[in-house]
């Protein structure tokens, strides 16, 4: 009967309750979306491996390193495999069509990244074609790339028109894998540069190093950087995760702003909900006085009010969470390759639920206290 | 009167209310007894203190001084929780505006006080149905208060007051919001409760015709008892 009373009380003012639920739904949905955006920001780092190291020029990522470092790094104790990647930074049709493009050492790169899942036939086709390209399935879906399509990129770092043929479309081993990238042969880039700008040939953006024992990454990183100390291109070696987080830290202010907005949304709905509960309790003073006269104690009244607040907040929260999935899906698609991984995590759902319940509990604190302390005589008189 | 022992005993009861810096006296040294089984009407002009006196006897307010023993308990000495528990066991309330929970049906409203008892749901239902039958509302059990007339709502309130088999029933202007016919029905019902099952009833009323249903009328004026009038044997 207590539960029945709570639910019937919650919907006594249908419009007010529905509007509050709608407000909560929107707030919880917004919180979930913003949290997912923040998580998407960190997705690259989340999906990064601790067994891979990234070696780059210590001055800046903009400056390359000589190809000759490859052999020297390979010989360092603990290095299991090595590959290379150069940021290409080309434009597909228009600058707004952004997606990451890398010129990679094809023969080794795919072995270092088992999370990129590709059929044997596509892998062979890619390896055979010097102008071949591998595209992630999200990228392919976004721009309609199909096997055999020719994709032309306008180089910005490496000037000129660059033609590629899509030879493979890779999928991700798990949801955290970035499937919005574009890979092509470094040999194609290098040989072209040898002809167009010879001084820029045989240069590597980053070396990707796989270590045999992930517990030795610090020691191996130090060994690599020591090997090139006092050279023309000193190196900075860090785990792939640290490397990715370095990018995120450049935009930390945006992430902080998004986080603040998401908490602000929850705070606003908390104020709205608290107002709803305060109005509710004020209107029912005589009823609470009657219940107290009948012998019901303050605990019962608190249970009624907390229960009502939690019922409203729970409904709003549940609806908000349920809507987060389709809205995030649509949002992720609308953002295209800007957010390579845009999935609603269990942590986000847990936080949404916690926020909804917190709003329910906090909004009921003062109204419940007021109801529990209502003076019976004054409360009954308020009805007259 | 149906019994001999004093169920309610008031000795030198004083009560006042604070208005800003001042205390306005409402009751100034009230002393009298109410016997078990008695149906007593409290009458007096507005501000005479009759509702305050009823609130004190019902344990929803406390005297400033004096001794107030009801059903063998000095209720002025009880703490909040004990007093609430005492009310649940000993007092049935009938209010002028019925004070039913608007979202609960007639049956659920009557059943409500039984939530405080160690009783199964089926047992609660059975007792609530019986109580509603006693007030001739067996066919209105599922109705919400808003679907009932004023007289019917007051009868539901009477059933709610009866359901815990309280030691005494307090009624504050029980007919004040009713038309003449409904008021007559409610008063007859209260009289039957007193006559047939011996319930002690204390009723505050402005209406002398309502008061005629009681055994006696206690008159209050300016916070003091001004007389007792026997009206019905």
Image (spheres, coloured by chain):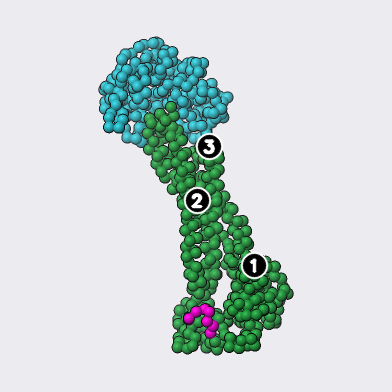
Chain colours: A green, B cyan
Name the foreground residue: B43 vs B85: B43
- The secondary element bearing badge 3 is classed as loop
Above/below status of A140 relative to A161: above
* Distance Cα–Cα, label 2 vs label 3: 21 Å
Can the viewer see residue A41 in this picture?
yes
Sequence-wise first label, 1 or 2: 1
Percent x, y for residue A72? 52, 88
Q: Residue at x 52, y 82 (%)?
A: A63
Counting other residues with Cα less than 10 Å from the Cα at mark 2, is it few (<14), some (14-19), or many (20 or more)?
many
A324 left or right, relative to B23: right
**Mark 1 — residue?**
A138
- The secondary element bearing badge 1 is classed as helix
Magenta-highlighted stretch: main secondary structure? loop
* Distance Cα–Cα, label 1 vs label 2: 33 Å
Sequence-wise first label, 3 or 1: 3
Q: Are marks 1 and 2 in one subunit?
A: yes
Q: The disc numbered 2 marks a residue on which chain?
A: A
Above/below status of A45 relative to B170: below
The disc placed on residue A12 is: 3
In the current view of this chain or complex, which residue is farthest to the right? A148
Name the foreground residue: B186 vs A241: A241
Percent x, y for residue A111? 60, 78
Q: The disc numbered 3 marks a residue on which chain?
A: A
Above/below status of A260 relative to A153: above
The disc placed on residue A356 is: 2
The quarter of the image holding the N terminus of chain B is: top left
- The secondary element bearing badge 2 is classed as helix
Q: Give the quarter of the image for residue B118.
A: top left
Which residues make up the magenta segment? A58-65
């Amino acid at each position: 009967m207590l539960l029945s009373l709570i639910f019937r009380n919650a919907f006594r003012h249908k419009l007010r309750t529905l509007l509050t639920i709608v407000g909560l739904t929107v707030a919880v949905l917004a919180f979930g979306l913003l949290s997912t955006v923040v998580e998407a920001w960190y997705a690259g780092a989340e999906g990064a491996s601790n067994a891979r190291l990234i070696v780059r020029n210590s001055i800046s990522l903009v400056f390359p390193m000589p190809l000759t470092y490859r052999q020297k790094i390979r010989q360092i104790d603990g290095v299991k495999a090595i590959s290379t990647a150069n940021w290409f930074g080309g434009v597909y049709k228009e600058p707004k069509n952004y997606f990451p493009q890398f010129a990679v050492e094809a023969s080794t790169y795919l072995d270092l990244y088992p999370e990129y899942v590709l059929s044997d036939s596509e892998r062979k086709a890619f390896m055979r074609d010097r102008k071949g390209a591998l595209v992630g399935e999200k990228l392919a879906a976004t721009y309609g790339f199909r096997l055999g399509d020719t994709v032309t990129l306008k180089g910005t770092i490496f000037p000129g028109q660059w033609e590629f043929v899509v030879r493979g479309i890779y999928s991700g081993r798990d949801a955290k894998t970035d499937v919005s990238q574009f890979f092509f042969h470094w040999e194609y880039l290098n040989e072209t540069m040898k002809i167009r700008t010879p001084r820029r040939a045989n240069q590597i953006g980053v070396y990707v190093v796989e270590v045999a024992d992930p517990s030795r990454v610090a020691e191996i990183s130090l060994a690599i950087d020591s090997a090139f100390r006092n050279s023309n291109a000193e190196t900075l070696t860090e785990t792939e995760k640290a490397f990715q987080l370095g990018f995120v830290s450049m935009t930390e202010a945006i992430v902080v702003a998004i986080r603040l907005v998401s908490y602000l949304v929850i705070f606003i709905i908390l104020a709205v909900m608290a107002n709803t509960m305060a109005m509710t309790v004020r209107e029912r003073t005589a009823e609470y006085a009657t219940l107290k006269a009948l012998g019901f104690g303050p605990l019962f009244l608190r249970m009624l009010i907390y229960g009502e607040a939690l019922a409203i907040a729970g409904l709003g929260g549940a609806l908000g969470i349920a809507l987060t999935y389709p809205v995030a899906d649509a949002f992720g698609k609308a953002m295209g390759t800007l957010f390579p991984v845009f999935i609603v995590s269990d942590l986000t759902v847990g936080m949404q639920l916690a926020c909804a319940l917190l709003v329910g509990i906090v909004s009921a604190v003062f109204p419940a206290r007021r109801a529990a302390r209502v003076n019976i005589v004054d409360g009954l008189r308020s009805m007259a | 009167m149906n019994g001999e022992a004093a169920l309610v005993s008031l000795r030198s009861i004083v009560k006042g209310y604070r208005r800003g810096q001042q205390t306005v006296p409402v009751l100034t040294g009230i002393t009298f007894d109410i016997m078990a089984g008695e149906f007593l009407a409290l009458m007096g002009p507005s501000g005479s203190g009759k509702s305050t006196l009823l609130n004190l006897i019902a344990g929803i307010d406390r005297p400033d001084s004096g001794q107030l023993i009801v059903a063998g308990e000095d209720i002025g000495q009880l703490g909040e929780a004990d007093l609430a528990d005492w009310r649940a066991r000993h007092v049935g309330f009938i209010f002028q505006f019925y004070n039913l929970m608007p979202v609960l049906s007639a049956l659920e409203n009557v059943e409500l006080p039984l939530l405080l008892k160690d009783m199964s749901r089926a047992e609660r239902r059975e007792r609530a149905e019986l109580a509603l039958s006693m007030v001739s509302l067996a066919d209105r059990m599922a109705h919400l208060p808003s679907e009932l007339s004023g007289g019917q709502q007051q009868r539901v309130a009477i059933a709610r007051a009866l359901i815990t088999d309280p030691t005494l029933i307090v009624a504050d202007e029980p007919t004040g919001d009713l038309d003449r016919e409904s008021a007559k029905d409610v008063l007859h019902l209260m009289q039957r409760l007193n006559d047939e099952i011996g319930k002690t009833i204390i009723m505050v009323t402005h209406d002398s015709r309502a008061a005629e249903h009681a055994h006696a009328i206690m008159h209050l004026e300016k916070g003091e008892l001004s007389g007792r009038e026997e009206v019905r044997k």
